[in-house]
Amino acid sequence: MERISGAHPLFQTLFNLLPRSLLGSGCEFLYNYDNHVELEWAGLRIRPWGLEQQNGNFDLNLEICDIGSIYHCVLKYRTDLFDDDTTALLAAQFRETLLAIARSSDLIDVKNVNRTITIAATFTAEPIGPVIDFWRRRFMLPGKTVFAPFNQVFQQLLDPGSDLRTTREGSSVCLVRFDDWLEKKETGIDGMLSALKVAAVEFESAVKTAAQPLIIVICKPAEALLWTLF
């Protein structure tokens, strides 16, 4: 795989929660926000002067810093990939999700509930299993990860008895890579786009048939496909 010097080799999106216990009083200096906190350093009483943050190193990066009485959020994004309206919508949806969780009367202790993550993918996804297990242990979340057979996304969505559709206490996840929907006989931009359009319509229909909450992740296609289409 070719290494691109201007991109992180593993991921291009980042969610970073910075706890006050880790940063201490230094978090007062990290972000430019309206604060009136006074600190004492080496016998001097000082007031932080917020710094403008550097440009992000990722395509999309959400940082949340525990200031003490509030959580300060900074959303950084590449302007050649995202416009202001899109990122504003992402921020608004994230805020609404947090508010819905805070207002919910059905909050439970997730550490006492076994959660199954069922994954159906258009490619071999088992290598991410150890990563998921690591974060389960890190956050002390009991449960297991189940992988559907290779490239059985449509079958899992349409079969009422499949692992994906019978997951109740947990999450059902579909990992989709567009180039996995293309056959070798399809050549040229028009042929590829036509095939992808048909596959997308069929996928939407299968998702509606499943009629249950799903996490759908659109994964990065092969570089060759990107060069062909764009």
Image (cartoon, rainbow, N blue to C red):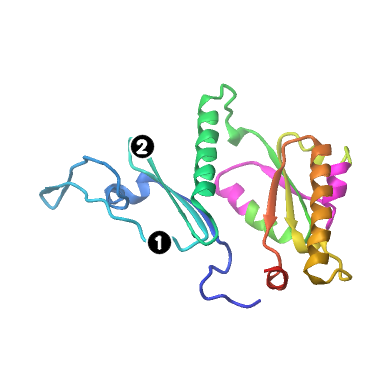
Residue sitting at x 53%, y 69%: 7
Rendered-image quadrant of the N terminus: bottom right
Residue 217: x, y in percent?
A: 68, 51
Q: Residue at x 36, y 46 (%)?
A: 21
Q: Looking at numbered disc 1 in the image, what kind of residue is underneath it? A: Asn
Foreground pick, 4 / 137 = 4
Residue under numbered circle 2: 70
Q: Which residue is mark 1?
A: 55
Give the extent of the magenta segment: 133-158
Q: Earlier in the sequence, mark 1 or mark 2?
A: 1
* Residue 167 image position (x, y, % from top left): 77, 38
**Horizontally, is 64 left or right of 168 in the view?**
left
In the figure, is residue 159 to the left or right of 8?
right
- x then y, percent, for residue 140: 57, 43
Q: Is residue 133 above or below residue 186?
A: above
Secondary structure of residue under mark 2? loop
Task: Tell me the number on the disc at residue 4.
Answer: none
Residue 93 as seen in the image, left or right of residue 158: left
Q: Nearer the viewer, residue 16 or 87?
A: 87
Task: Specify whether residue 156 is painted magenta.
Answer: yes
User: Residue at left 65%, top 34%?
Assistant: 113
Who is closer to the viewer here, 103 or 207? 207
From this view, report whether residue 157 is shown above or below residue 196.
above
Quarter holding residue 105:
top right
Marks 1 and 2: which is nearer the front? Answer: 1
- Front residue of 135 and 60: 60
Write the residue at 59% across / 76% down.
3
**Please, which residue is most extreme toward the bottom here?**
2
Q: Residue 18: give x, y in percent of width and height.
A: 41, 49
Q: CA distance from mark 1 to mark 2?
A: 23 Å
Decide: few, some or many residues near mark 2? Use Cα within 10 Å; few <14, some 14-19, many ≥20: few
Q: Is residue 40 magenta?
A: no
